[in-house]
């Protein structure tokens, strides 16, 4: 055997722990997954399957693991040589811990592989692969058997899982624990071995299947890979591959042999133990049958579209096997193992059923007939003489095809004999041979017919046959095939099997009955439709051989019929299949072939000629081909024969031919159904035709043929053309009314067949297909409904008649009736195409209980279905409910937002009650009624009896979960800000609220949520099956839909802010089962992670401590779960799954899950319950380290996965910095991130595609997270550890952030403004914002980011303006989504850059470049706010965030560099930003909307503080300051006063303090005293001083009802205080009588009345000591003696307060700074007054003794320790002063 190539087979990397080795089972799961895999996953799978070793295994799938050989041994030694492995390749070799789930050392693997190779007799490399797979499967198995935590639920059905199937049948060997462990490992590996054997075949079949699908289909992503494999097959020998498959089937069938001598050695050895003999033998027998079945399935696919002609060798092999094995009947087995096992019996049936299909496919009837016809037609061509040459027959012409036709079996006598012998021997004895019998008889008869046509007779004596070689070949061969003549032999063959053929077809095409066991049915086959095509072809070609009987009709019907519920699936199948013609292949629509086939059209004519006398055959045949709507409708509208039983005594006809011919002619009109009486507005009908009044009259002169003349009544077939559809309508009408018609027509069976036919015709009509696909335009009612209604009454049509029939039947819902299901299917077929008829019907129907009547849905379920165990009616009702929900969503905008163009183009304008025939209230009531019944079913369906089809249980659960999810998703997932009545999906709100009340209740009832938990338990127990894949798909789909439903419920609880629900508590309790569900099957991974993520996030919002995920999982389960999580989605690396994994970890570390967070971030395995006393295992590599390792290749990672990983790192750093290792310990992560972002250049170009824009948005988000990580890293390091080396490396790589991070580029303002405007003009009742997603949805970027495109397609798809043209509104909304994605990521980048920039400010003292760069960043922030022109209503948050960013950086820079002169430019830009929107600024001041401008004012304040330290300023700067004082101080203060009065609840007092601070800072500027005059003028013009005094007087009212904190009083007086420091303004204040105004207020009165102190009333004391007292001092100091009298009046007024202040120093109990300042102020003002000459007047006016205070102060100064004990702080600033040991001089 040649050496095996090691290219891309992943084994070498797996041995080095760099990836996980893909199993064939996982490859198969990915190939057939309905989810579109990522580009990376496709690339990895393609790489694996394209490797030479994989292709070789696939080509040898009949024997994928050959015996060992010298070549395989050399290859094994080469792969496992120590030289190929370094220390880092071994577990923990990189020094960062062991990767969870790592393989053992290569030496251990090598030993295990050699042992397994010897035991199983397989090659060493394959054994090594199996050993690796077994090791890699251990974490999942250990998780499945792990114990849940003490706080978790008991095991939800996982006991017994994770145990090898083979090991589970062995007896435990308690006396030898090590032997028991070794046995378990061996059987685990054997189980992997058996599973891989099966799935190699399944993968091969999947690749072949991909070649049969349309390569242009987006869903067929494996087409190229399949064609590559087929090309390899052809190059290596397609026929040889097929023969090998037959040999593989043969070897397995006869493997046991006689006395089991053919069993593998390891099986024989173990079976020597009688205790396990039966169990092991059973397991191996089951494996053998599964492989036989899979090889047959693969062989069928190979034959369905063969790459080469089937040659004789293959035919001889197959039919030799069939002859010996008796078509896999039990009699064909040498040793029948387990003859009494029902499952094994079922496998025999299954294998035999497949054998019948393969035997039919292998004889290639279409191809054989085509080649034979071409071959014989050449004999009569002009190039060929009709007379053979004299020297002998002519040679056959050269073949037309590229392949030699001589290889075709039909030209090989041995092959023909082999087939004939097998057929002759088995015909009539084995039903499974009957299909091959019929097919072979067809071919031989055709050959005989061709031979007869092309045989020439010599003109001489005798009867010598002469002809071509092929004619002579068959002339000589055919007589040898049968002991009698060919005709007799063929007839005898067909006669022997005639009773079995159609019966077999009916059995394999009919519905399967799962309760009766593993029976063969094409409905459960993966390629069932293809197999059905093969059978249908046989039925069409052979029907001429059989009598017109019920089996023939039923077989023909089933071979072409498509049930209503399967129409969509069937249409997808037809679309996916490659178009390759219809004559010489089975591929294509069988119904189209039926209509083109002469034989089947004759069969249909035979049924038509007996209609309506025998209605059922014709109705069933027509229903079987009803999917061809147009052709069938046209056919039925003009039938030319009417057959019926003549009335008693009817003799009004004449003979019109020979008497024996039976031809007659009507002598008078024959009334079959009298017309109705015409109404007032109806015209008389024309005579002799179908009456418009519903009469059916055959006119005089019509010819007919007597079919039956016996008895008193004759059956006559009239040659009369009529509309059968119209007659169907009359039959239905007669069934409703009392009018009589033929009893053979008006009965429940015929009515049911007619309704079923109409349902399929409606569903397959162009109108219904367009409506279902939501194609733009107005959906007309299907034509067939009009045709059927043609003869009905004036006020009736077929829809109303059908509804009446259904309602009448539903009134008797306690009796089983098939019409219920058919009638509801008809209703369902109309939901999307005629919703205005369906909603009113449901409003009055008895189906639902409304207003105390009805309730047939629940009644029939309880009375009939639950007792019988069959739930077709319930499933049909749920399907109707699902359609109604979908239609309710779709129609939510049809009549609200209808475009004018649509109204004009519509033939029938929407009418009445919202266009649905009922009001919105009724629609809601109907949906709510369905929801109530559905919830009742949901709570109970798992306990129902399922006696006919267990799959119905899965279907019910799946449908219910899907419907509930849809309702909740669209009720709460869009339109967050509209109320319930105005939501675009408002019709769903009552149902959604009911679901929330049931499933999110805080009550302790488990009934509503038990199905969810039960589905999770079902998922944990998902069977491993390679056979019943459709049933398995139902199983998996139910689990997935239930998990999705639970996920939506949990997210809605968080979204609505409801208290914690019982559901969440139970889900936490079942968290161990959810972890096991993650391990149970790959298909569950994404959904489980989403549910766990939502659960953790939701519980993180609890006010109390959330449940512990780790506690519920338990240490054992948690360890294994984290091990599995650490493997991510290796080796496929699907971004969707890996992104969900990182998102889940991010949720854990950010939502109070301390234990689980540490387990994930540290990688330290928790102590398990049974691990006491054992050696501590090596530390596992944490998920964080795994993430770091992956990010080393960040430049080549998919951007979505990179983003998720970086989000996890930044979140972990933010919440768990202290628990994490220093990032610097991972030497490549930080340099790698910096290098990645260093060369970022993202430009937004108009020509960018959707994918490119999405990628750019994600890249910006990546840059944001990198900035966040760097910021947190710098912040987390101790101040002494600020790494200058790291900083010097970092700074040059931040160019992207300095240049781009604060800019919001690419916003398309015109797009958004015009889109919203035009959108609402187009659909007047719909707003674009109603399509906006809510917080319920997960954040994504791209064309579906903000506005829900799926919902848009649903609700607006009716209008061509939405998606009917390339530049429609859909395209514009997608562009808006893409644009908003870019904007959102840039906003996130701005926030993250702010964090990083603030941390960089710590380094500015040592870097002038950094300082200048940060100043430039500040300037850019402000300039962007000025210049970009972003609309404030939309981007107010961005403007505020950018301004806040600038302020924070300016403040940090000022703290670090207080003496820098770099702030002047910032001041100019900030003031410019205010001036650029001065009107908006004034508006913001007056309306208390200062979020944006507050940051600008703070920046200005800081820059003025910095400018105050400069000695000189330019004239330009002075002018700017004057403008500032005008706009901000004079006008701004007045506006703030107005805002405080008009908006007291939202006004911020800090804004006034900020304006006062700016005033203070400007007054401290040096060398520009000229600003004082300008300030005085502006104050006078704006009456700012009066505004301040007014605010002071309002202060108590603005302080609230009790007036306890008059903060505005303090702020206003401090503002006046600052003004009073300017002499010219002090004069102005004096003229305003400022002190008199202030003393006249109630605040002043309270001060003197209460005698305030710093402790009794701090605010009033501050107003006095910090405001009024210094204000008086300033006025006195600036005005002088001219103001003395006012000052004395002031002192006299506040004499009580002054006395209180002085008396407080007599014997103080506490000394505080405000009291000291107050004493100083009192002393100063008294001293100044006295020195200015007012001593006598002062003494005469007031009685103030300052000596009391002086003595007290002197005493304290003499006793400093005592003074120190009395000193106390009244503010944080004072505390800092006390800690510093000295007072700090503070400004604003």
Image (cartoon, grey):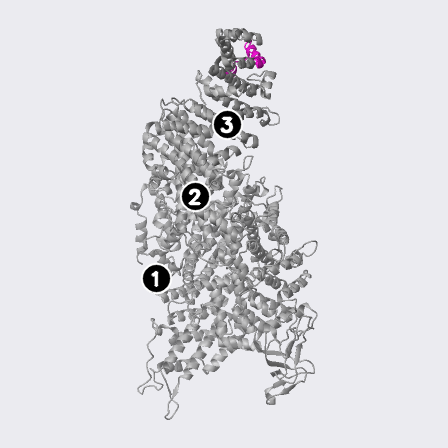
Confirm or deny contact between disc 1 and disc 3 (CB under 8 A).
no
**Residue at label 3?**
1552
Is 732 or 1005 nearer to us in this picture? Answer: 732
> Which residue of the protein is positioned furthest toward the bottom in this rendering?
461
Say above or below: 353 vs 1227: below
- The reply to whether residue 949 is visible in this rendering is yes
Assign the N terminus to one quadrant of the image.
Answer: bottom left
Residue receiving disc 1? 232
Q: Is residue 1272 visible?
A: no
Residue segment shown in magenta: 1692-1715
Alpha-carbon span between mark 3 and mark 2: 34 Å
Count neighbours of disc 2 (C-alpha within 10 A) and say few if under 14, some if 14 to 19, many if 20 or more.
many
Q: Position of residue 934 (x, y in %)?
A: 61, 53
* Comparing labels 1 and 3, the label whose residue is closer to the camera: 3
Q: CA distance from mark 1 to mark 3?
A: 83 Å
Q: Does the magenta-highlighted stretch encompass residue 1589?
A: no
* Quarter assignment of residue 1107: top right
Q: Which residue is mark 2?
A: 1383
Q: Which of the marked residues, 3 or 2, is nearer the chain's N terminus?
A: 2
* Element carrying mark 3: helix
Looking at the image, tell me whether mark 2 or mark 1 is earlier in sequence order: 1
Q: Nearer the viewer, mark 2 or mark 1?
A: 2
């Amino acid at each position: 055997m040649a050496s095996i190539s090691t290219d891309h087979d992943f084994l070498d990397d797996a041995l080095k722990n760099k990836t996980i080795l893909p199993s064939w089972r996982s490859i198969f799961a990915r190939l057939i997954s309905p989810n579109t895999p990522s580009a990376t996953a496709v690339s990895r799978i393609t790489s694996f399957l394209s490797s030479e070793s994989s292709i070789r295994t696939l080509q040898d799938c009949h024997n994928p693991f050959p015996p060992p050989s010298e070549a395989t041994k050399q290859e094994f030694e080469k792969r496992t040589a120590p030289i190929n492995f370094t220390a880092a390749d071994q577990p923990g070799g990189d020094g960062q811990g062991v990767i969870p789930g790592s393989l053992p050392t290569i030496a251990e693997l090598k030993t295990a592989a050699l042992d397994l190779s010897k035991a199983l007799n397989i090659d060493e490399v394959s054994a090594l692969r199996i050993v690796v797979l077994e090791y890699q499967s251990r974490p999942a198995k250990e998780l499945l058997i792990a114990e849940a935590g003490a706080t978790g639920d008991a095991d939800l059905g996982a006991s017994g899982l994770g145990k090898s199937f083979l090991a589970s049948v062995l007896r435990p060997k308690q006396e030898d624990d090590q032997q028991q462990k070794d046995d378990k490992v061996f059987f685990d590996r054997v189980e992997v071995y058996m599973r891989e054997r099966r799935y190699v075949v399944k993968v091969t079949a999947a690749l072949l299947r991909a070649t049969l699908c349309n390569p242009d289909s987006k869903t067929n992503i494996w087409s190229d890979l399949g064609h590559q494999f087929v090309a390899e097959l052809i190059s290596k020998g397609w026929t040889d591959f097929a023969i090998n498959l037959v040999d593989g089937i043969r070897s397995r069938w006869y493997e046991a042999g006689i006395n089991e001598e053919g069993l593998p050695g390891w099986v024989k050895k173990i079976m020597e133990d009688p205790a396990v003999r039966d169990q092991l033998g059973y397991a191996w027998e089951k494996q053998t049958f599964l492989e036989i079945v899979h090889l047959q399935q693969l062989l069928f696919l190979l034959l369905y579209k063969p790459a080469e002609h089937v040659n004789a060798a293959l035919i001889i092999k197959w039919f030799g096997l069939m002859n010996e094995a008796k078509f896999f009947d039990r009699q064909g087995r040498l040793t029948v193992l387990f003859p009494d096992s029902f499952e094994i019996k079922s496998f025999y049936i299954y294998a035999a059923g497949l054998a019948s299909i393969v035997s039919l496919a292998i004889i290639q009837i279409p191809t054989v007939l085509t080649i034979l016809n071409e071959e014989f037609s050449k004999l009569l061509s002009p190039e060929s003489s009709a007379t053979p040459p004299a020297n002998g027959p002519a040679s056959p012409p050269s073949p037309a095809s590229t392949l030699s036709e001589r290889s075709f079996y039909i030209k090989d006598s041995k092959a023909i004999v082999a087939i004939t012998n097998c057929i002759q021997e088995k015909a009539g004895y084995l039903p499974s041979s009957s299909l091959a019998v019929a097919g072979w008889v067809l071919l031989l008869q055709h050959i005989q017919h061709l031979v007869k046509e092309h045989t020439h007779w010599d003109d001489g004596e005798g009867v010598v046959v002469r002809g071509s070689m092929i004619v002579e070949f068959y002339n000589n061969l055919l007589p040898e095939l049968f002991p009698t003549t060919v005709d007799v032999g063929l007839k005898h063959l067909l006669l022997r099997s005639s009773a079995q053929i159609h019966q077999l077809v009916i059995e394999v095409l009919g519905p399967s009955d799962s309760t009766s066991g593993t029976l063969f049915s094409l409905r459960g086959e993966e390629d069932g439709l293809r197999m059905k095509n093969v059978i249908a072809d046989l039925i069409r070609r052979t029907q001429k051989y059989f009598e017109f009987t019920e089996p023939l009709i039923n077989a023909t019907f089933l071979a072409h019929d498509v049930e209503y519920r399967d129409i969509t699936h069937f249409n997808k199948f037809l679309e996916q299949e490659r178009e390759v013609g219809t004559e010489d292949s089975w591929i294509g629509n069988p119904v189209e072939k039926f209509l083109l086939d002469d034989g089947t059209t004759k069969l249909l004519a035979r049924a038509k000629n007996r209609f309506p006398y025998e209605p059922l055959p014709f109705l069933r045949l027509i229903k079987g081909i009803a999917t061809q709507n147009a052709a069938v409708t046209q056919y039925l509208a003009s039938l030319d024969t009417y057959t019926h039983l003549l009335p008693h005594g009817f003799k009004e006809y004449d003979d019109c031919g020979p008497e024996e011919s039976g031809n007659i002619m009507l002598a008078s009109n024959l009334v079959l159904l009298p017309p109705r009486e015409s109404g007032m507005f109806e015209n008389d009908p024309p005579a002799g035709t179908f009456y418009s009044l519903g009469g059916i009259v055959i006119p005089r002169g019509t010819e007919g043929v007597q079919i039956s003349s016996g008895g008193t009544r004759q059956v006559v077939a009239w040659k009369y053309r009529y509309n059968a559809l119209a007659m169907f309508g009359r039959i239905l009408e007669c069934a409703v009314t009392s009018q009589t018609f033929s009893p053979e027509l008006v009965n429940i069976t015929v009515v049911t067949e007619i309704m079923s036919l109409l349902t399929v015709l409606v569903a397959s009509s162009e109108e219904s297909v367009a409506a279902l696909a939501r194609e733009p335009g107005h959906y007309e009612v299907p034509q067939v409904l009009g045709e059927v209604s043609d003869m009905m009454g004036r006020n009736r049509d077929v829809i109303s008649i059908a509804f009446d029939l259904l309602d009448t039947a539903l009134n008797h819902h306690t009796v089983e009736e098939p019409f219920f299901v058919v009638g509801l299917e008809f209703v369902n077929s109309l939901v999307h195409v005629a919703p205005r008829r369906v909603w009113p019907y449901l409003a009055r129907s008895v189906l639902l209980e409304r207003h105390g009547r009805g309730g047939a849905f629940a009644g029939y379920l309880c009375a009939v279905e639950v007792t019988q165990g069959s739930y077709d009616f319930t499933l049909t009702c749920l399907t109707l409910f699902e359609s109604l929900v979908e239609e309710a969503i779709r129609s939510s905008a049809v009549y609200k937002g209808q475009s004018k163009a649509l109204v004009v183009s519509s033939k029938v304008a929407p009418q009445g009650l919202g266009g649905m025939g009922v009001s919105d209230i009724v629609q809601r009531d109907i949906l709510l009624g369905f929801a109530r019944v559905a919830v009742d079913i949901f709570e109970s369906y798992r306990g129902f009896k399922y006696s006919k089809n267990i799959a119905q249980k899965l279907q019910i659960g799946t449908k219910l979960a899907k419907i509930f999810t849809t309702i909740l998703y669209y009720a709460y997932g869009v339109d967050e800000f509209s109320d319930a009545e105005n939501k675009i999906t408002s019709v769903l709100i009552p149902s959604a609220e009911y679901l929330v009340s049931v499933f999110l209740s805080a009550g302790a009832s488990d009934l509503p949520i038990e199905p969810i938990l039960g589905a999770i338990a079902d998922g944990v127990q998902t069977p491993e099956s390679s056979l019943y894949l459709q049933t398995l798909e139902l199983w998996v789909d139910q689990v997935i839909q239930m998990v999705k439903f639970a996920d939506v419920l949990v997210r809605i609880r968080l979204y609505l802010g409801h208290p914690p629900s019982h559901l969440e508590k139970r889900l936490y309790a079942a968290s161990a089962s959810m972890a096991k569900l993650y391990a149970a099957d790959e298909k569950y991974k994404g959904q489980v992670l989403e549910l766990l993520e939502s659960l953790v996030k939701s519980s993180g919002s609890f006010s109390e401590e959330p449940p512990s995920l780790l506690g519920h999982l338990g240490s054992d389960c948690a360890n294994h779960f984290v091990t599995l999580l650490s493997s991510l989605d290796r080796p496929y690396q699907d971004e969707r799954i890996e992104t969900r994994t990182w998102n889940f970890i991010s949720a854990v570390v950010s939502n109070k899950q301390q234990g689980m967070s540490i387990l994930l971030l540290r990688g330290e395995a928790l102590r398990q319950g049974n691990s006491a006393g054992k050696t501590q295992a090596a530390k596992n590599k944490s998920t964080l380290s795994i993430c770091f390792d992956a990010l080393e290749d960040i430049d080549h990672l998919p951007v979505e996965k990179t983003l998720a990983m970086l989000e996890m790192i930044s979140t972990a750093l933010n919440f768990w910095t202290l628990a994490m290792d220093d990032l610097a310990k991972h030497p490549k992560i930080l340099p790698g991130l910096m290098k990645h972002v260093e060369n970022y250049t993202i430009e937004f170009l108009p020509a960018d595609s959707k994918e490119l824009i999405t990628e750019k948005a994600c890249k910006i988000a990546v840059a944001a997270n990198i900035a966040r990580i760097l910021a947190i890293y710098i912040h987390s390091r101790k101040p002494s550890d600020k790494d200058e080396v790291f900083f010097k490396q970092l700074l040059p790589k931040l160019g992207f952030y300095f240049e781009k991070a604060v800019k919001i580029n690419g916003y398309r303002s015109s797009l958004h403004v015009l889109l919203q405007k035009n959108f609402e003009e187009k659909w007047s009742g719909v707003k674009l914002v109603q399509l906006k997603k809510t917080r319920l949805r997960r954040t994504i970027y791209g064309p579906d980011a903000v506005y829900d495109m799926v919902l848009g397609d649903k609700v607006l798809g009716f209008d061509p303006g939405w998606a009917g043209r390339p530049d429609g509104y859909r395209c514009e909304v997608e562009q808006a989504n893409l644009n908003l994605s870019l904007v959102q990521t840039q906003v996130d980048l701005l926030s993250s850059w702010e964090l990083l920039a603030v941390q960089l400010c710590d380094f500015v003292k040592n870097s002038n470049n950094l300082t200048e760069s940060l100043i430039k960043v500040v300037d850019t922030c402000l300039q962007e706010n000025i210049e970009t022109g972003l609309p404030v209503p939309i981007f107010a948050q961005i403007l505020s965030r950018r301004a806040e960013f600038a302020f924070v950086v300016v403040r940090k820079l000022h703290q670090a560099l207080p003496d820098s002169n770099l702030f002047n430019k910032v001041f100019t830009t900030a003031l410019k930003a205010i001036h650029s929107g001065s009107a908006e600024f004034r508006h913001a001041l007056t309306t208390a909307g200062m979020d944006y401008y507050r940051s600008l004012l703070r920046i200005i304040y800081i820059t003025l503080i910095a400018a105050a330290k400069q000695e000189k300023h330019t004239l330009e700067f002075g002018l700017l300051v004057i403008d500032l004082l005008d706009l901000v101080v004079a006008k701004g203060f007045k506006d703030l006063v107005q805002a405080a009065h008009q908006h007291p609840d939202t006004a911020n007092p800090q804004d006034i303090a900020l304006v006062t601070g700016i005033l203070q800072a400007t007054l401290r500027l040096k060398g520009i005293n000229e600003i004082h005059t300008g300030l005085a003028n502006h104050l006078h013009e704006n009456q700012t001083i009066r505004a301040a005094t007014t605010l002071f007087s309002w202060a108590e009212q603005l302080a609230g009802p009790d007036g306890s904190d008059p903060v505005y009083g303090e702020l206003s007086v401090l503002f006046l205080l600052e003004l009073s420091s300017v002499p010219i303004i002090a004069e102005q204040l004096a003229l305003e009588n400022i002190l008199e105004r202030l003393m006249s207020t109630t605040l002043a009165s309270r001060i003197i009345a209460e005698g305030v102190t710093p402790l009794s009333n701090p605010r009033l004391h501050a107003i006095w000591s910090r405001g009024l007292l210094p204000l008086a001092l300033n006025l006195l100091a600036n005005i002088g003696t001219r103001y003395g009298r006012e000052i004395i009046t002031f002192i006299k007024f506040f004499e009580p307060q002054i006395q209180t202040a002085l008396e407080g120093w007599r014997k103080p109990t506490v000394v505080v700074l405000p009291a000291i300042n107050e004493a100083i102020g009192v002393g100063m003002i008294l001293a100044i007054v006295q020195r200015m000459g007012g001593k006598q007047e002062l003494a005469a006016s007031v009685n103030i003794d300052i000596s009391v205070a002086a003595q007290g102060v002197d005493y304290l100064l003499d006793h400093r320790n005592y003074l120190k004990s009395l000193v106390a702080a009244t503010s944080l600033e004072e505390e800092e002063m006390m800690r510093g040991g000295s007072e700090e001089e503070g400004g604003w």
